[in-house]
Image (tube, rainbow, N blue to C red):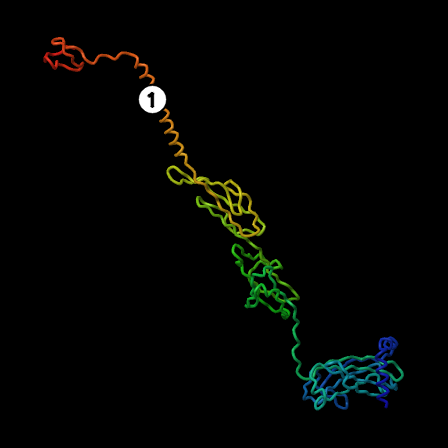
């Protein structure tokens, strides 16, 4: 009956403990000077094997304490409340006494072997309360102890997310490769654990498109790295998109065919404007076509918002040699015409004059002989010039 009254009072006292504690006198107030758990305490208060770790094969766990500043002749009541690993009250031990000295030792025990604590390994605790009869309940201490082998505490884990800004790019995490379509990927990793993440430097996309690694979201530019978990974190691999410019020409040499960052400007360049075709013809650069424009050897700016192609357009024309020959021929014809005209005019002028004789009579016989004859064909006489 006395125990039930004390427990009821103890329960009420714990609800108003802050107020009750404030009413405890500071002068000559009872206090706990020492407490601990051990394997055994004999009837004289002598303890053995101080420890906070108990096996399920141990008979009992003892809680020993010492109170000081007791009022001799005053009646006191003590209570030990034993709580299981779920912090649920298992049982309560009470003790009432009349102080015979200012300092006295007290102890209580809870059986382990063959009782419920044997089947409930884990971290237990014992709370100690005391009061003098008619006075407020005071909290003395709370002492923890373990029964049986405890599982090692679970290490803290943090969510770590790995992501990539281009879904056509894969990332390798701890040796396993994940496609961009699997991103973002979140792992619950233990605190202070180390993990490897790796990205590729260049990843081909569709024709004329590729993705080039720039850095991780924390500014690190290493393709492969080891990270240490210190808290919730996200690592994103950042890639830039590049487009290819194709420059083609049937003649000459071209420049500008390469990869360009998305949104940048590019130029197609040709090193010559004419190429000899044959003796009388040549190819002449006309303009740029395709995704390029302009009539100069260097095209107008090409905005690289996708794969682009620049094509040099050529025309076949007569060469300067051809025109030179034409000029020479024309000159020869002209000169010939002038000469012919002059000769015609001279002939016409001379046509009105009498023609000189082509024969004359032989002085010996009178036969007509040619001017070039030396002897007369008729008389055979020599002709005198």
Q: Which residue is mark 1?
A: 340
Spot occupied by residue 47 in the image (x, y as percentages of width and height) = 73, 87
Camera-nearest residue between 96 and 333: 333
Q: Residue at x 45, y 41 (%)?
A: 315
Residue 297 is left or right of residue 56, and the answer is left
Spot occupied by residue 159 in the image (x, y as percentages of width and height) = 65, 68
Spot occupied by residue 74 in the image (x, y as percentages of width and height) = 88, 85
Residue 45: name its quadrant: bottom right
Q: Residue at x 73, y 89 (%)?
A: 111
Q: Residue at x 46, y 42 (%)?
A: 314
Q: Residue at x 52, y 54 (%)?
A: 208
* Quadrant, the N terminus: bottom right
Compared to residue 275, the image places residue 123 above or below, namely below
Residue 380 is left or right of residue 274, and the answer is left
Residue 232: name its quadrant: bottom right
Camera-nearest residue between 333 and 363: 363
Spot occupied by residue 247 in the image (x, y as percentages of width and height) = 49, 48
Rate crowding at label 1 as few (under 14), some (14 to 19) or many (20 or more) other CA atoms within 10 Å. Answer: few
SS for tag 1?
Answer: helix
Compared to residue 91, the image places residue 285 above or below, namely above
């Amino acid at each position: 009956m006395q125990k039930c009254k004390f427990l009821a009072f103890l329960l009420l006292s714990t609800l108003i403990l802050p107020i009750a504690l404030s009413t405890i006198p500071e002068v000559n107030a009872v206090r706990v000077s020492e407490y601990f758990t051990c394997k055994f305490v004999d009837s004289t208060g002598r303890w053995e094997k101080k420890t906070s770790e108990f096996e399920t094969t141990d008979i009992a766990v003892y809680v020993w304490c010492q109170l000081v500043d007791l009022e001799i002749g005053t009646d006191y009541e003590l209570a030990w409340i034993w709580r299981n690993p779920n912090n649920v009250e298992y049982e309560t031990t009470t003790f009432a006494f009349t102080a015979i000295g200012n300092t006295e030792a007290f102890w209580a025990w809870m059986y382990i072997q063959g009782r419920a604590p044997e089947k409930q390994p884990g971290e237990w605790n014992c709370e100690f309360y005391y009061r003098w009869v008619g006075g407020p309940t005071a909290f003395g201490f709370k002492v923890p102890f373990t029964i049986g082998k405890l599982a090692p505490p679970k290490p803290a884990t943090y969510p770590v997310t790995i992501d990539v800004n281009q879904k056509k790019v894969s990332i390798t995490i701890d040796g396993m490769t994940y496609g961009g379509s699997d991103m973002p990927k979140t792992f619950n990793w233990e605190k202070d654990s180390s993990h490897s993440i790796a990205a590729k430097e260049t990843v081909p996309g569709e024709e004329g498109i590729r993705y080039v690694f720039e850095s991780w979201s924390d500014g690190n530019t290493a393709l492969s790295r080891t990270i240490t978990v210190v808290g919730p974190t996200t690592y994103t691999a950042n890639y830039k998109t590049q487009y290819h410019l194709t420059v083609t020409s049937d003649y000459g040499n071209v420049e500008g065919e390469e990869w360009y960052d998305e949104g940048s400007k590019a130029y197609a360049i040709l090193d010559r404007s004419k190429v000899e075709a044959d003796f009388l013809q040549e190819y002449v650069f006309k303009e740029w076509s395709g995704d390029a424009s302009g009539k100069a050897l260097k095209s107008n700016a090409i905005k690289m918002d996708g794969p682009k192609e620049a094509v040099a357009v050529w025309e076949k024309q007569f060469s300067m040699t051809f025109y030179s020959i034409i000029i020479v021929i024309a000159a020869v014809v002209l000169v010939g015409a002038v000469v012919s005209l002059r000769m015609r005019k001279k002939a016409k002028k001379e046509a009105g004059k009498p023609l000189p004789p082509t024969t004359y009579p032989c002085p010996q016989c009178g036969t007509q002989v040619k001017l070039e004859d030396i002897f007369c064909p008729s008389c055979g006489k020599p002709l005198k010039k």
